[in-house]
Amino acid sequence: MLTSCSTVAVLVATVVFAAAYTIPGRTEPNGLPVYHDSPLFWLFTCLDVLAIACSLSSVAFFLSILSSPLEYPFFCHGLPRKLMIGFTLLFLSMAATMLAFAATILLVIRIEKKWTKSLLYSISFFPVPLFGLLQFPMFQSFKDIYRKITKIFHLFLGFSKRVCGKDKAN
């Protein structure tokens, strides 16, 4: 699962990196993008930068999990925390990528008919809330699993404070 998430994060980073160099519209003879004064162009640029930063950060978190030591303190706190941060960053990179795509659609496609424009814009933004709703149960289940793991350590293992590194005196 972890390697699959790393692969998806690298693929998102690759697509976003390519989108940064394939600027929406065309460029003027002086090298500036045609839409460089448009707020939607700056929205696209900011979302693209956010997507690549979150994607590569999630890759870093997933790789840190894969190369971490196999010790009890890591499994109590480090692993669930890094896993949640990695998944959250991957989710943010996917959402930012989808929003950058929608901003590009709004920027490039200029349609005069109001109903066609409304339909096209609605369809281009549709994947973002759908993706968020589909991922919410996963984040909720990770939160529940983290609570159960810590409860098991506290209830059944009397020495969990020493094992999980909570007892700093020893």
Image: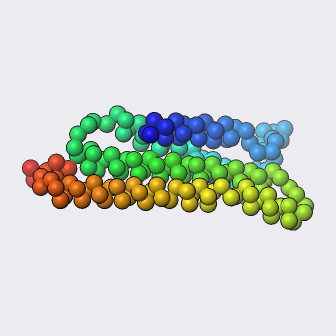
In this view, 13 is above or below 116: above
Q: Nearer the viewer, residue 34 or 164?
A: 164
Give how far across and how far down residue 46 sits, in percent: 63, 52
Report the side of 165 relative to 98 (left or right). Answer: left
For the point 41% across and 36% down, the residue is: 63
Q: Is residue 14 above or below residue 156?
A: above
Question: Does residue 51 appear anywhere in the picture?
Answer: yes
* x and y percentages locating residue 72 in the rendered image: 22, 43
The N terminus is located in which quarter?
top left
Quarter where residue 153 is shown: bottom left
Q: Which residue is drawn at 84% across and 38% down?
A: 29
Q: Which colour scheme is used?
A: rainbow
In percent of width and height, residue 167 lies at 14, 54
Residue lying at the far right in this picture: please name it.
Answer: 112
26 vs 142, left or right, is right
Asked whether 145 or 59 is in front, the reply is 145
